[in-house]
């Protein structure tokens, strides 16, 4: 039965214009409209259509693909477009609460148009705005209104020239002066300059600045966020004492003005401190609801998890765009053939299929993961907003942190590699700027390193799993987590005894087979990593050294395999729900199996090695 | 003993300026000057220094890294710089013959400065110029002089919009008209437009145009090269009947003007035919020293091998630049440490070492391979020039074709992946345009697809090896090739019986160990591919289908493993020569072992699987 959409689906999902892809489209074993409805839902399709139609009809968003825009002009255009998005007011606050997935959907639509626009909008609202909202108090609500009217324009200034990942080493200071009831924001030297801050280069009027808070007596209370005006909103000239500028050209996202700033004894009112986690009385006494400095720090950086989830979803957008471009090109480009006269579409070559189709499957699997993780995050944030201090809430925070810390690396790397494959698979045509694969690659690239370098982040996930295993070994605790992503580990001893017993290739085309292998693999890697870590410590390594020495060979593959398993698991469950339309089951099942088997195949050497060890338990590989 | 250089090495290899790298440099176990002398030789170091000094002192070559140049300005600058390189006349024709390695060295120096400049110079001289010289005859020598004085500026127009790899499907025509003694060059439709032609966009006045030659009676004699004037050298306006233009912005190499052209019945004199492989008499009779159309075609495209060798060497330049930038940054960037107070250089982390050091080793191994293959090519070209028609000369051509067809993919992909790793390993700083990693990546990118798409080219190499095995199986021929790269295969049955018997990790740190494993692997892959191909054919596949069905799983890894083996073999021999200074043996041996083991490790799954099959010969993996 064909799907129906209220009010007629012709307007919502019109037919494609006739063209060279018709022949392939006619051969499809399923209805693309039905798939779109199942994947997105009608409400979301309408929401996205509203956005795309608005942009399509607005001359400010017209562009020539591959145009040679100057940096300044591109940044100016991007700012004007960002402002226009606020004017369109696509998403009301009520809508956000009713359909939280519309928040990432809006960002994704902007990202489909231009990553720089998505980043600029996201940084102002969800990063700067959320920081003010979640770290501030009632006295800061006045800013929120100005954020949405774009009377002020914001940025989030944490990273410094010499310190990004190691936030504890950040050195901007904020000394409180009780005489004037002001904080003095200061950059002790150029290495402490705020650096890479998106929106800061040309356009931000205000910054959330992280600085070490000192009260009289020179006692330091660690990093705290302050809202600091850095430019005059009318002239955009820097405020006195603020040296602020643009970082210059980047590999991509050049519509976004990343900037630096140094503060020379800049005085801001006491109320500039975003005081949810700690405040200073007019007299200069530090007060905080949190007793522990580390806990305070954790709370103030809690927003970073949502940053990672946003990046994950933007990486998926880039992958989707690239794979659509490459597959469509491959279906129309003909080269060679069985005879000299007859040429076939390059998509018919097994090589081209092996290069591209796994990334199509990855786009579906990661898209679903990205949405489901966002909904988990919403649950976490609602708990926080309602003051939930339960153990479950804390566990949920840790689990989401672990999933986001490996999810961002997996999605950004998959997109990076996928776009590169797409670009090469389109040959010379893929190298032409107007075909967009270059822009997608360049704009996706920072997803691999910002908001936490991928390799550094993966340690968070492996540490999470190792911590759970230590807890189990030492205290007999169960593997249990609110989202159940680690629950299977409870049975790790029996899982490790399982053997692969599938007897035909056809049987492998069910993602349940790859899932079982993945579970075995994660159990195996977890045990090996734990043993290796303890062995390192026993041979005299410090904790720091031991972790560093285990990360390449053990921690990194553990974190990635765990996350891949989670993605496979969630997509497998999604496509095997009873509500899946029967006509879509086959194609969705194939996508799920393809992603699972392809991901798993990258661990093939490890699986063989593990099997070998099992068959000769006395014999260790010489390489270990 | 410290190396000495005539005239004092201080001028040739001055000390580095003092800076944050001093501490690491002081810890080096060898003299970098000695290594530079061994790697390059004094004469080459002087030659490169002459070039770099000239560029450094010439304001035309001054630039601001990361500057926001417009397309037009960049192309103009690149053209002026190219012209200036001719004025400097760094390399006389005598020098070229005496020290042929100076030819790629000059291109590499230009590539170190800017890939677009290297490409523009290379396309005019070594591609356009060589094509005129090697495909033309005495009557075309007048062009050669004008090429070196840049009175004319050239391009090489083979690829068309719809056909690149499949050159046989190219459709531009050249009909001979005996009445006027002219050829009529014509593009039948837009899909036959010449496309992607470097230098054609803005600056070329002449093109070597490949077109299907027809003589009266409409007999087609296949693709032939014609020299066609496309622009007026004074005004750069297109010649009548020529529609020529620029392709627009690309992902990189934007200093190079790639162009398209369509010819509307453009008449050129009979003498425009570059007639070495075939000519037309004034009356319109086709005459050729070659009887076979395929053989003629092969001769006319013989120059492509040299293009691939040039690309290989430019990819190595990009990798060298990137790895130097990333390692220097990693040695100065500090982040985290064993205590909160003490931070360590990121280069100290095993993760950073595992990410970067293999690419350092790859740069050395591939650099050596690139030079040695170039010298092989010189031998081939000298044979051709002296009219050598021996079987050895023909075999040498085939062997070099096979090595270049996999060498270009291996080097361009290694550079692509290496630069990406470098960019990510430098975190945010790596994303800033002025740090050059982005430009290197973007400029290296087309190396993966032009002059033959990497995946398509690899088939040439696997076909070469399969052909030799078929010859052996069917005719009992030996594996023998002029450069001896395939000779080891003669012992394939006994090599396949060998087992890995090395008993300690320390013993593996000799590249001879990896070499032995590589030989086994190539023998194994060759036999498996041959069997798989025959099995495909037996089950009814055509030759075309059978090859396509084997390429992903068999042909591709076979070609890559064979080429890696060749690179490892040549570098291993190079660093184990008796003339290697004793103080360099350790470091060179480590580089050789690191490259060999790292490359081999990417085949780990295959090695495990093969071992498993050997131990259970009755059992085939279910996946095959």
Image (cartoon, coloured by chain):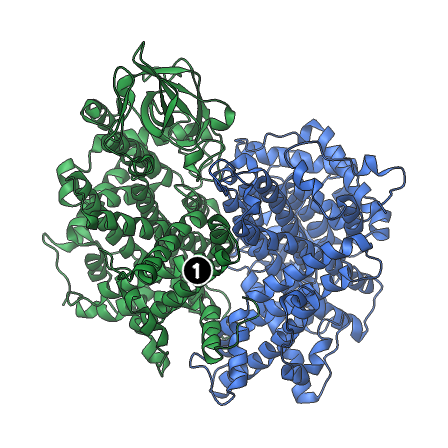
Chain colours: A green, B blue
Residue B17 image position (x, y, % from top left): 71, 32
Which residue appears farthest toward the right when viewing the image? B6
Determine whether the residue tagged by mark 1 lies in a helix, strand or loop: helix
> Which residue is identified by label 1?
A557
Q: Which chain carries label 1?
A: A
- In the image, B476 versus B600, the foreground residue is B600
Q: Tell me which residue sits at (58%, 40%) in the image.
A: B329
Residue A594 visible in rendering: no
Number of marks in the image?
1
Which residue appears farthest toward the bottom when viewing the image? B618
User: Is the residue B265 above or below the residue A206 in the image?
Assistant: below
Q: Tell me which residue sits at (54%, 71%) in the image.
A: A621
User: Is the residue B7 above or below the residue B523 in the image?
Assistant: above
Q: In which quarter of the image is residue B533?
A: bottom right
Residue B137 image position (x, y, % from top left): 78, 57
Q: Quadrant of residue A439?
A: top left
Which residue appears farthest toward the top when viewing the image? A179
Label 1 crowd bin: few (<14), some (14–19), many (20+), radius 10 Å: many
- In the image, B363 versus A51, the foreground residue is B363
Residue B299 image position (x, y, % from top left): 71, 65
Q: In this view, does A37 lie to the left or right of B57?
A: left
Q: In which quarter of the image is residue B404?
A: bottom right
Residue B372 image position (x, y, % from top left): 75, 59
Q: Is residue A239 left or right of residue B139?
A: left
Residue B521 visible in rendering: yes
Which residue appears farthest toward the left when viewing the image? A6
Q: Tell me which residue sits at (40%, 25%) in the image.
A: A202
User: Is the residue A492 above or below the residue A292 in the image?
Assistant: below
């Amino acid at each position: 039965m064909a799907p129906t959409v209220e009010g007629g689906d012709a307007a919502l999902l019109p037919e494609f214009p006739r063209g060279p892809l018709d022949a392939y489209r006619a051969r499809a074993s399923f209805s693309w409209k039905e798939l779109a409805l199942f994947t997105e839902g009608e409400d979301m399709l309408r929401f996205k259509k509203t956005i795309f139609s608005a942009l399509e009809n607005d001359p400010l968003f017209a562009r020539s693909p591959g145009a040679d825009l100057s940096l300044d002009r591109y940044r100016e255009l991007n700012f004007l477009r960002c402002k226009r998005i606020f004017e369109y007011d696509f998403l009301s606050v009520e809508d956000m609460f009713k359909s939280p997935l519309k928040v990432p959907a809006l960002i994704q639509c902007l990202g489909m148009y231009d990553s720089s626009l998505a980043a600029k909008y996201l940084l102002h609202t969800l990063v700067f705005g959320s920081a003010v909202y979640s770290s501030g108090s009632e006295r800061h609500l006045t800013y929120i209104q100005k954020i949405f009217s774009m009377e002020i324009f914001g940025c989030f200034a944490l990273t410094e020239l010499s310190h990004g990942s190691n936030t504890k080493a950040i050195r901007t200071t904020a000394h409180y002066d009780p005489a004037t009831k002001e904080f003095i924001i200061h950059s002790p030297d150029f290495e402490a300059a705020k650096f890479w801050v998106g929106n800061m280069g040309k356009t931000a009027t205000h910054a959330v600045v992280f600085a070490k808070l000192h009260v009289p007596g020179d006692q330091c209370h660690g990093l705290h966020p302050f809202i600091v005006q850095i430019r005059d909103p009318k002239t955009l000239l820097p405020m006195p004492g603020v040296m602020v500028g643009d970082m210059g050209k980047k590999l991509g996202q050049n519509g976004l003005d990343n900037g630096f700033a140094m503060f020379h004894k800049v005085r801001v009112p006491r109320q500039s401190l975003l005081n949810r986690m700690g405040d200073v009385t007019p007299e200069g006494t530090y007060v905080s609801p949190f007793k522990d400095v580390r806990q305070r720090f954790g709370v103030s950086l809690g927003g970073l998890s949502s940053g990672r989830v946003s990046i994950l979803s933007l990486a998926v957008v880039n992958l989707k765009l690239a794979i659509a471009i490459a597959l469509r090109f491959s279906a129309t480009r003909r080269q060679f053939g069985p005879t000299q006269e007859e040429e076939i579409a390059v998509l018919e070559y097994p090589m081209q299929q092996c290069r591209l189709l796994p990334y199509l499957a990855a786009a579906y699997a990661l898209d679903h993961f990205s949405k489901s993780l966002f909904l988990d995050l919403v649950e976490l944030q609602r708990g926080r907003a309602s003051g939930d201090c339960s153990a479950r809430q804390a566990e949920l925070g840790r689990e989401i942190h672990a999933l986001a810390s490996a999810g961002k690396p997996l999605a950004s790397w998959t997109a990076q590699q996928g776009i590169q494959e797409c670009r090469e698979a389109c040959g010379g045509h893929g190298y032409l700027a107007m075909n967009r694969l270059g822009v997608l690659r360049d704009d996706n690239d920072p997803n691999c390193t910002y908001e936490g370098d991928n390799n550094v982040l993966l340690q968070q996930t492996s540490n999470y799993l190792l911590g759970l295993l230590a807890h189990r070994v030492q205290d007999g605790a169960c593997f249990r987590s609110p989202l159940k992503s680690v629950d299977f580990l409870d049975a790790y001893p029996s899982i490790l005894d399982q053997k692969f017993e599938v007897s035909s290739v056809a049987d492998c085309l069910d993602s349940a087979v790859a899932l079982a292998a993945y579970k075995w693999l994660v159990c195996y890697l977890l045990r090996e990593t734990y043993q290796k870590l303890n062995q390192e410590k026993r041979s005299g390594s410090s904790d720091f050294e031991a972790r560093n020495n285990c990360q390449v060979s053990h921690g990194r593959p553990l974190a990635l395999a765990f996350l891949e398993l989670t993605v496979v698991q969630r997509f497998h469950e999604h496509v095997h729900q009873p509500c899946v339309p029967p006509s879509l089951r086959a194609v969705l099942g194939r996508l799920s199996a393809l992603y699972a088997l392809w991901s798993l195949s990258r661990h093939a050497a490890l699986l063989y090695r593990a099997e070998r060890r099992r068959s000769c338990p006395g014999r260790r590989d010489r390489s270990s």
